Amino acid sequence: MSVQLNHTIVHSADREAAAEFTSSMLGVRAPMQFGPFLVVEVDNGVSLDFIDAGGEEIDPQHYAFLVGETEFDEIMGRLAERNVTHFADPGGQRRDEINHHDGGRGAYFADPSGHWLEIITRPYGSGAT
């Protein structure tokens, strides 16, 4: 068997808000309950398993999603509809812009717990600079 990422646990200030936000922004199936987790599964079978941090400080993480051109446009539309600020860079300096790394498009935005979500249309290192 090959090695594949199956799931990761995402600590959240409010697991319901974070899981709903992520699934709705990405346009994937609504979160499903599994034990103490709300599970958001993406199209390649990997899941983000949201759990409440129980009042503990959350160390923001970065989650990058490879999406198609159509999905990128749809996600950007949903961000605009909900007035979610996006950036072209992970440092949050290029507000309301997208990047064009590797000849594709990319953007960063924060979830309700402060985790950076990134959408890209080309994997890093796959094409033009």
Image (cartoon, rainbow, N blue to C red):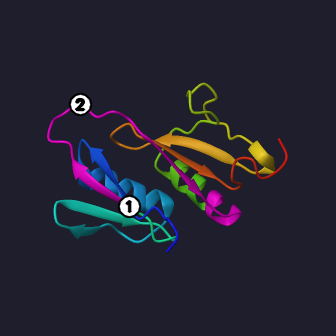
**Residue at x-position 16% and y-position 66%:** 35
| Residue on which disc 1 sits | 7
| Labelled disc at residue 57 | 2
Q: Position of residue 73 (x, y in %)?
A: 65, 58
Q: Residues within 10 Å of mark 2 (few under 14, many from 20)?
A: few
**Viewer-closest of 92 and 103:** 103
Residues shaded magenta:
48-73
Q: Residues within 10 Å of mark 1 (few under 14, many from 20)?
A: some
**Viewer-closest of 123 and 13:** 123
For the C terminus, the quadrant is top right
Determine the secondary structure under disc 1.
strand
Q: Taking the image as drawn, is residue 84 in sight?
A: no
Q: Nearer the viewer, mark 1 or mark 2?
A: 1
Residue farthest along the right direction in this orientation: 128
**Viewer-closest of 15 and 102:** 102
Is residue 27 inside the magenta stretch?
no
Labels 1 and 2: the sequence-earlier one: 1
Q: Quadrant of residue 21?
A: bottom left
Residue farthest along the bottom direction in this orientation: 1
Q: Taking the image as drawn, is residue 91 in sight?
A: yes
Q: Position of residue 104 (x, y in %)?
A: 76, 51
